[in-house]
Image (spheres, grey):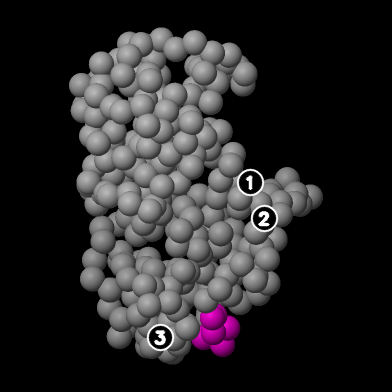
Amino acid sequence: MKRALLAIACVSTLAACSTSSSTSTTSVVDSTAFTDTVDMSTTNTVAITTTTLSTIEEKVVECDEDVISADIKTKVKMERCTENFGIGNTDKNTWNCPDDGCREASLFKRVNGTWSTNTMCRKDQPMVTPMRLCYRTDKAAVATDEDIFPPKIACALWDANSALRFVSFTGCEPSAAAVKESLTKKCQGEWVQNEYLPFETCDSGPMVKHAQKAMQAAGLTTELDGFYGSDNAKQIAGFQEKNGLRKTGMLDIDTWKKLVAVAPVKGTDRDGDGVITPDEM
């Protein structure tokens, strides 16, 4: 949760919250934070139906770019689709994207048989409140829950929702590719200092070293070097498997609770959540 608050704090530099008279919460996004070019002339408004969005679940299928292009009247490059939802970009919007791909993606929806799009999101953020960075392209406004994908669709299409660091917020299963990377990634020159759980492959710092002390005390094999590499992830993955936890290799709060149940740690529970975390040791 502490790391979640840090992530939210980072997002708050791009979005400021305000409350309307209807008690719903919206945000105002600084449009300069989105670096890719958006072609405002090619977007259409999606008609929101009365379908209960939270229950919608569809299989991933091949995108029909010809049909989508015809409906929105411009060429598109799609990344992934279900029957009625898709992510991608108009061809024109990809012209100024970096070589490794666009930092944002358009959200496409098919309503009453016709595809349209009016929303873009930052691909490195999960599609979940309040961490998402999504905005309407047809007007100066932050996207609402109705503008983005239903939760199960987001799990299927939006990579960030299945990233290890975000699954505790999105409720999605981590992707097989993310788990594999956690257990095999080489971290040369890619270490990131992190003071709070969860710890992922390539995290580092004094709090990681505290966690490694607890890992050692619980019988796991690790160096006390403050670097959480794939070797640590493999040790944690084995521990997770033995204890009936989701096998990810990420040292999250659930894994930490099991770990300190085996090897209790000393410290001060400053936030009163009932568990002493590495930053409180």
Could you classify mark 3 by the number of other residues whose Cα lies within 10 Å: few (under 14), some (14-19), or many (20 or more)? some
* Quadrant hosting residue 213: top left
Asked whether residue 180 is in view, the answer is: yes
Q: Amino acid at mark 3?
A: Asp
| Residue that numbered label 2 is attached to | 13
Pick the residue in front: 148 or 263: 263
- Mark 2 or mark 3, whichever is nearer to me: 2
| Residue that numbered label 3 is attached to | 91
**Horizontal arrangement in the rendering, residue 196 relative to residue 168 (left or right):** right
Instruction: Give SS at disc 3.
Output: loop
**Horizontal arrangement in the rendering, residue 273 relative to residue 220 (left or right):** right
Residue at 37% from the left image edge and 18% from the top image edge: 214
Q: Position of residue 261 (x, y in %)?
A: 37, 11
Q: Amino acid at mark 1?
A: Ala
Question: Is 47 above or below relative to 278?
Answer: below
Could you classify mark 1 by the number of other residues whose Cα lies within 10 Å: few (under 14), some (14-19), or many (20 or more)? few
Inter-mark Cα distance, 2 to 1? 7 Å
Q: Amino acid at mark 2?
A: Thr
Q: Which residues are magenta?
A: 37-42
Question: Is 95 above or below relative to 98?
Answer: below
Q: Position of residue 75 (x, y in %)?
A: 38, 88
Question: Is 174 above or below relative to 226?
Answer: below
Instruction: Give SS at disc 2.
Output: loop
Inter-mark Cα distance, 2 to 3? 30 Å
Pick the residue in front: 272 or 146: 272
Asked whether residue 51 is in view, the answer is: no
Residue at 34% from the left image edge and 75% from the top image edge: 78
Residue at 65% from the left image edge and 71% from the top image edge: 32
Q: Position of residue 114 (x, y in %)?
A: 40, 77
| Residue that numbered label 1 is attached to | 9
**Horizontal arrangement in the rendering, residue 114 relative to residue 64 (left or right):** right
Residue at 56% from the left image edge and 73% from the top image edge: 35
